[in-house]
Each structure stands twice: as C-alpha cells, then as structure tokens.
Amino acid sequence: MSQFLTEVENCIPALRRYAHALAYDSMEADELVQDCLERALRKRFLWKPTSSVRAWLFTMLHNINANKVRKVKRQPVVSSLENDIDKTLHPIDSDMGIRDIKTCLRQLPEQQQHILLLVALEGMSYKEVGKILNIPVGTVMSRLSRAREALRTIMTAAQTPRLRRVK
C-alpha cells in the first residue's frame, strides 16, 4: 500500500501539468487532479500491481476531464458582461508566447490536443498514450503527426502579418 501511495505522490506534478494543459485554468486543473486522486484512492483495489500507476492515473484524469467537458457542453452558457469587458480591456499575460501557443493548441481537434499534450508535454511513449486513450499505437502516431502539422500551420498563419488594402 505504501508503495502505491508513493507512486501516486510521484505522479502528482505530471498530473497537474497535463490537467493544466487540458483545462487552461489553474483552478480547474487543480480540481481535476483532486478528483483524480480522490478516485484513485477510493478505487485503488481496481489497480493491478503489474500495470503502471502513472498510466492508470492519466487514464483516470483523461476520463474525468472528458466527462466534465461533456457535462459542460450540455449546460447553457451564462456570461457576465462585466467579465467579458474586463477580459477585452486587460488582455495581459505574463508571457505572450505561451498565450499564443495555448490559443493555437485550442484550435486543434480535442483528440489531437490530448495526444500532443501526452507525448510532447509529458514525454509518454506512443504505447502509454494508446493505453491511456484506449486506442491503437498506429492511431496515436497518425493523430500525433496530424496534430503537429496542423499546429505548425496554425502557428505560421498566426505569425504572418495580415495587410489591408487601402484604396
């Protein structure tokens, strides 16, 4: 049991990185990680000692996020006009490059985002990603290739200045 808890504890920083990349919001990311850890502790009897704790936790985090996204899509969107105005008047981000990358990443299909984040951000193998997302390794490779190409295209288009014609 203590070995299990130690492995879970060692995975927390990686889970937070992945959750933050999925949620784009630190509070939402912390909530995802907390839900994941709570579920892991509650259902630790389902973990097989022959399998990777890390892959099991990432699978759990991925599924929790997918469930939350589906739930949010079914709910109506309520927005405050003051908050929207504040965001447009104060679009300050400490690192403009990171904000631009996040914006470009959000334009990718969700499946490609997840694979790109797991491989590039977390350094997972294609086999691990396939196990987490429950897809074949070949699918991981093709989606990753498409994601990288699409991201390159999006980022190139974002960096190209647009000129207006003046008559």
Image: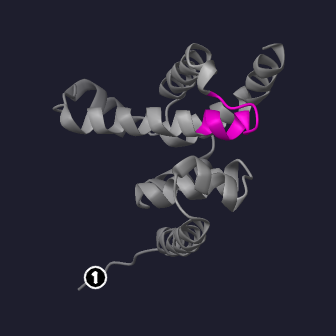
The residue at the point 54 percent across, 33 percent down is 60
Q: Secondary structure at mark 1?
A: loop
Residue 155, placed above or below residue 118: below
- Tag 1: residue type? Val
Name the side, left or right, on which 151 lies relative to 95: left
Q: Quadrant of residue 38?
A: top right
The residue at the point 37 percent across, 35 percent down is 67
Q: Quadrant of residue 15?
A: top right
Q: Position of residue 161 (x, y in %)?
A: 47, 74
Report the residue that reaches farthest toward the left. 76
Report the residue that reaches farthest toward the bottom. 167
- Residue pointed to by mark 1: 166
Q: Position of residue 55 (x, y in %)?
A: 67, 41
Residue 53 is one of the magenta-drawn residues? yes
Q: Position of residue 121 (x, y in %)?
A: 68, 50
How many labels sit on residues? 1
Residue 90, placed above or below residue 42: below
> Can residue 138 be seen in the rendering of this structure?
yes
Magenta stretch in the rendered image: 47-58
The residue at the point 67 percent across, 61 percent down is 126
Q: Position of residue 118 (x, y in %)?
A: 63, 51
